[in-house]
Amino acid sequence: MTAAGNKWGIVMSRNAGYRLQVVELDFLYPSEGIHRRWEKGFRITSAAATEDQAAFILSAPKRKSQDVMQETLRTSAFPSTQVKFISFIYFVG
């Protein structure tokens, strides 16, 4: 998913392992729509924003996973204490 100005580009694949995919688009954070989708088993699989809009792709997997957890954290600065960073080092030889 991408955006430029007031135009959006969204690609969803038919055989990507999801039962359903939807887009939530709003001028503010679409909290109600996202929480409603979470209750139906959807999970955020992509996000993008412009200066005045935010969009989220939510996908419902074909098989339900019990070990997936998502939460919303709204803050005015990057939540460095809440986000865990994992470093991956790849050696090519």
Image (tube, rainbow, N blue to C red):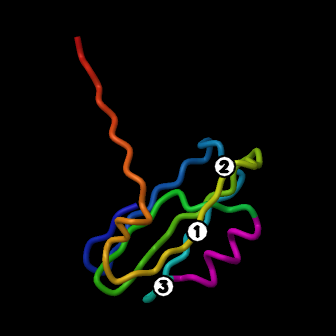
Amino acid of disc 2? Tyr
Sequence-first tag of 2 and 1: 2
Q: Nearer the viewer, residue 69 or 43?
A: 69
Is residue 31 inside the magenta stretch?
Answer: yes
* Location of residue 77 in the rendering, given as x and y in whole percent from the top left corner: 31, 78
Region in magenta: 30-40
* Location of residue 40 in the rendering, given as x and y in whole percent from the top left corner: 76, 67
Measured Cα–Cα span from mark 2 to mark 1: 20 Å
Q: Which residue is mark 2?
A: 18
Amino acid of disc 3? Asp
Name the element at disc 3: strand
Is residue 33 inside the magenta stretch?
Answer: yes
Please tell me whether residue 17 is drawn above or below residue 2 in the rendered image.
above
How many numbered circles does the render carry? Answer: 3
Q: Which residue is mark 3?
A: 26
Q: Nearer the viewer, residue 86 or 27?
A: 86
On-image quarter of the N terminus: bottom left
Q: Which residue is mark 1?
A: 71
Measured Cα–Cα span from mark 2 to mark 3: 23 Å
Q: Nearer the viewer, residue 37 or 69?
A: 69
Dots 3, 1 in contact, CB < 8 A: no
- Residue at image point 34% right, 65% down: 80
* Location of residue 29 in the rendering, given as x and y in whole percent from the top left corner: 48, 83
> Based on the displayed image, in which of its 4 quarters is residue 27 positioned?
bottom left
- Residue at image point 39% right, 66% down: 81
Please tell me whether residue 21 is drawn above or below residue 77 in the rendered image.
above
Sequence-first tag of 3 and 1: 3
